[in-house]
Image (spheres, grey):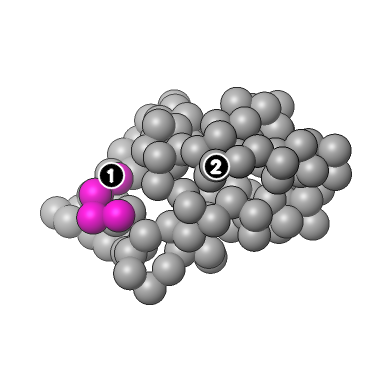
């Protein structure tokens, strides 16, 4: 993931795609939900950190970890606990996602 400015517009590069962070009422997680579900491949470290930060509950974490694919895990995380946690939880998820991104520009 790269953060940068392109003609004054802040963006994040994710798997070779630029996601522009424009002023909007819609949160990054909501706006890019489909791409996050498709592209985040290592969900467990994110879940562990969300649990540590008290964004999600142990029961939700365990339930999500039992799902078989990363897409299923991300879909459940975004539509369940993150949706319930509101903007603050989504902000925490976003920060964790950035910390967990790989050196190749993809979120792990």
Residue 7, image x, y percentages? 14, 54
Q: Is residue 47 above or below residue 69?
A: below
Question: Pointers 2 and 1 in contact (CB under 8 A)?
Answer: no
Q: Is mark 2 on a helix, strand or loop?
A: loop
Q: Which of marks 2 and 1 is nearer the N terminus?
A: 1
Residue 20's disc number: 1
- Between 70 and 12, the one lying in front of the other is 70
Look at the image and give the residue range highlighted in magenta.
Answer: 15-19
| Most distant residue in the front direction | 68
Can residue 67 be seen? yes
What x and y, as percent, mark residue 73? Answer: 60, 39
Q: Return the residue nearer the eye: 91 or 73.
A: 73
Mark 1 nearby-residue class (10 Å; few <14, some 14–19, many ≥20): some
**Front-lying residue, 45 or 24:** 45
x, y percentage for residue 46? 63, 54
Image-based side of 15 in relation to 107, left or right: left
Residue depicted at 43% across the width and 68% down the height: 102
Q: Image check: 55 left or right of 42?
A: right
| Horizontal relation, residue 79 to residue 27: left or right | right
- Asked whether residue 95 appears in the rendered view, the answer is no
Residue at horizontal 33 percent and vertical 64 percent from the top: 105
The number of numbered badges drawn on the structure is 2
Q: What secondary structure is marked by label 1?
A: strand
Instruction: Find the distance from the CA under tag 2 to the CA under tag 1.
Output: 28 Å
Q: What secondary structure prevails in the magenta region? A: strand
Near mark 2 (Cα within 10 A), the count class, few <14, some 14-19 or many ≥20, is some
In which image quadrant can residue 25 be found? top left
Q: Is residue 36 left or right of residue 95?
A: left
Q: Mark 2 points at which residue?
A: 69
Residue drawn at 31 percent across, 39 percent down = 22
- Report x, y in % for residue 70: 53, 44
């Amino acid at each position: 993931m790269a953060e940068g400015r392109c003609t004054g517009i802040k963006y994040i590069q994710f798997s070779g795609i630029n996601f522009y962070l424009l002023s909007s009422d819609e949160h990054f997680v909501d706006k890019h939900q489909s791409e996050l579900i498709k592209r985040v491949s290592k969900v467990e470290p994110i879940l562990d950190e969300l649990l540590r930060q008290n964004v999600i509950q142990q029961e939700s974490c365990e339930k999500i970890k039992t799902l078989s694919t990363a897409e299923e895990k991300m879909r459940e995380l975004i539509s369940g606990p993150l949706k319930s946690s509101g903007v603050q939880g989504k902000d925490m998820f976003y920060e964790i996602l950035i910390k967990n991104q790989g050196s190749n520009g993809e979120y792990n």
